[in-house]
Amino acid sequence: MVVDAANLERSLYLLAEMLLLPVPIILALNMMDVAGQEGIQVEPKVLESALGIPVAAMSASHNQGVDALLMALREFLEGRLYFNPKKPTVSAEHKGIMLEIENQISRYVPAGYPENWIALKLLEGDEELARIMAQRVPAQNWEKVSTLLYEHEDAVLDIAGERYEWIARMVRAAVVQPKLTRGSLTTRIDQVLTHPIYGTLILALVLGGVFGITYSVGTPIQIWMSNWVSFFAEFLRASLSTAPAWIPNLLADGILGGVGLVLTFLPILAIFYTALGFLEDTGYMARIAYLTDRWMHRLGLHGKSFLPILLGFGCNVPAVFGTRIIESRRSRLLTILLIPLIPCTARMAVVTVLTPMFFTSNAGLVAWGLVAGNLVLLMLLGLGLHNLVLKNEHVAFIMELPLYHVPNFKTIGIYVWQNLLGFLEKAGTIILAGSLVVWTLSYFPTGEVMTSYLSYAGKMLEPIGKLMGIPWPVLLALFTSIVAKENTIATLGILYGDLVTTLPVLITAPAALALLAFQMLFIPCLGTISAIRQETHSLKWTIISSGLMLGLSLFVGILIFQIGTFLAG
């Protein structure tokens, strides 16, 4: 069991429950470096003696103490570890009651369950075990148990109190607390950073800074890499000039124009992931959750919904699966419907590449506005659905705000590397397959996009595209993002080649803003749709979710273009 050495008192409550089970436990005392920075002195050997179980001190983020933990595991496997756990007890007032309950249920306990543990959990008010035992224990015996539980409803407070007293003894024995810790510094910082007004303004500045740095540093590198992709594409065409025409076109347009262009995202994504990793590792990401929860709660969303919603900024798929932490089915359903409004890193990657093509020096401001617009829509939609779906149901939300600490650059590096590796795997599989399909449909049977198989589908979308000022090939590229959001850039690269010089000429500023808003709000990728189907267990709600996003994207895209064109005219 892994616990936080800097917050040992809070971490040991779960251990107090685990020790009541007939399983051997090795305690991994992690984050010893953070405890040291706080001036907290933890004596592992003293704690080991007090608990009666092996304790291995470690700092996983610095790869310290891992060998000691592995040694303890090896000794356990070889039967050389000694376990004599000092378990928390039940007060004399309720110990007799627990024994009486145990006598009534002893012959009916499921195999593998300790009888005294079952009796204790019933006293604690465990509803699941009460349901199981009510089905197994004869009515006469269960009536006696129910009477005892009703007469001693306060037992749960007594049991918790005994555990906290046990924890206090363990901490007194093994921990020396400093008179002043960085916790007081964290409190002072949080008075500003979690303030409903100042904190929100600072959050807006932080997010604006993230986008600003991403564009100012990443875009020049992306353009340089894009030029090299164009150079290699022309080199392939010249080298294979004697081959059948479709071969150089496949390599230059289908592969380099699709996957090659997508790979130029890497510098931008690396900077973006580094910024996110930095915010997470310093402890500020939890403050973002806290701040956003405060405002979202007022607009109809309850607190627990924000944790999976926060995951959505990385990827909507785990965000949908993360809604399992929400007990209420209605609340879970509402959160699932709102998660596609969160711009995942794939959506942001597309916006990050396209925005500078149309808005150059104002790209950071436009991207910030697009994200803010999605969040505003999320809040408004949440308020509306709150009354329709949740019926004004409210659920409390409790979260821990960690101490601020110096970021671990190794941890951030691993985070960035894993995300970039995942992106490269997608580029080599889903995006490559999508690029080849799009190229084939756009090349055959005539070798020209405007008379290809793809043009038949594209021309069906032309009326919709006109309402947003978007040519049908661009709108078709947006629709290919259902497979993977990055396919938008891959398809545009195949259809138009050099996007930096081509797209700004074809698309006006209002149409470009409509295009970007459409991309931010469009139907999520197939992975997210599949996750929604799995978590809602309903085809109806899956269709409603996709239809809602399609309707929003079309409505907002058309509205932006029409208003923008009116103002420009």
Image (cartoon, grey):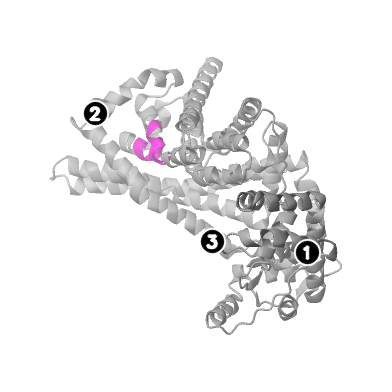
Question: Looking at the magenta stretch, what is its main secondary structure?
Answer: helix
Q: Farthest residue to the bottom: give it.
A: 80
What's the CA distance linking mark 2 and mark 1? 71 Å
Membership of 488 in magenta stretch: yes
Q: Quick check: can you spot residue 212?
A: no
Which residue is under mark 3? 413
Membership of 542 in magenta stretch: no
Give coordinates of residue 402: x percent, y percent: 71, 56
Give coordinates of residue 425: x percent, y percent: 39, 53
Q: Is residue 169 left or right of residue 231?
A: right
Is the residue marked by circle 1 packed among few (<14), some (14-19), or many (20+) residues within 10 Å? many
Residue 487 drawn above or below residue 516: below
Give coordinates of residue 43: x percent, y percent: 74, 78
Sequence-wise first label, 2 or 3: 3
Three-letter residue code for mark 1: Arg
- Element carrying mark 1: helix
What residue appears at the point 78 percent right and 55 percent down from the top-left corner? 156
Which residue is under mark 2? 453
What residue appears at the point 74 percent right and 52 percent down from the top-left corner? 144
